[in-house]
Amino acid sequence: MRFKKICYHIYIYMKKRSLPVIFILLFASLLANIFFVTKTIPNYIVQNVIDGDTFVLANGERIRLLGVNAPELKNCGSEQAKTLLTKLINNKLVIIKEIERDYYGRRMGLVYVGTKLINTEIIKLGWARPDYTKNSQNEKMKLAYKEAKENKRGIHSELCKKVNPTPLNPSCTIKGNIDQGTWTHLYHLTTCRHYNQIVLDEDIGEQFFCTEREAQDAGFTLAPDCLR
């Protein structure tokens, strides 16, 4: 921050001295480049992969893939996502751009191995979803997600996406559904109007419950369309 302040004061001095516009523009460009550099982590070796979208650098810093949401551990596809990310970056030199902080204060960014953008790669191969956090590669991530869905890769395959599923336990028929727009957690009884239309995406934690109490304890509430 101190270096940026020095640059700012130099810029003001140049302006007061009425230096040619070309010099001021060149200096403004320099400031922009300095800002960009501060938003980039220099090359580091990846030391460990935590899950499908989080890893640890050799300097001990924990980083999350910006704009990417891989299955939480123990959800369907979580092991495959972790295995893929390990293959893509573990023990490799990465550069991280567009550093941001997530809701929990963790650092996240666009991760490159050479020219390959890992954030897009893991979505394209079907083991993560875009979370639409604003970044310069949002459109590429959307296209990668569309391609993965159309080709039924990874979490979009029958492995994790259950259309009109049959519960493993005949007594556990309550469907827990998550609205991916609002992340509202709702459960549907067999008497609910849209029960047969509910698709379970197990990679995000949608599942069957045996009792309403079980669903409620997991954070789900009764869907408004249910008949009592």
Image (cartoon, rainbow, N blue to C red):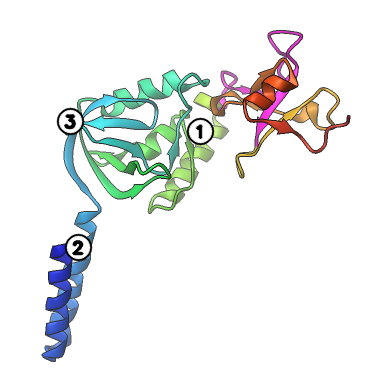
The quadrant of the rendering that contains the N terminus is bottom left
Image coordinates of residue 83 in percent, x first then y, are 36, 20
Q: Amino acid at mark 3?
A: Ala
10 Å neighbourhood of mark 1: few (<14), some, or many (≥20)?
many
> What segment carries the magenta color?
156-178
Report the residue marked by disc 3: 58
| Residue type, mark 1 in image | Ala
Residue position marked by numbered label 1 in the rendering: 148
Q: How far from the left and from the top, in percent, is residue 171? A: 76, 9
Relative to 152, say whether 172 is above or below: above
Instruction: Report the residue at 27% width, 29% height from top.
Output: 89
Q: Main secondary structure of the magenta part?
A: loop
Q: In which quarter of the view is residue 65 placed? A: top left
> Image quadrant for the C terminus?
top right
Q: Is residue 47 left or right of residue 64?
A: left
Residue 33 is inside the magenta segment: no
**Extreme residue toward the bottom, this view:** 18
Left or right, 146 with reference to 107? right
The residue under label 2 is 33
Q: CA distance from mark 1 to mark 2?
A: 35 Å
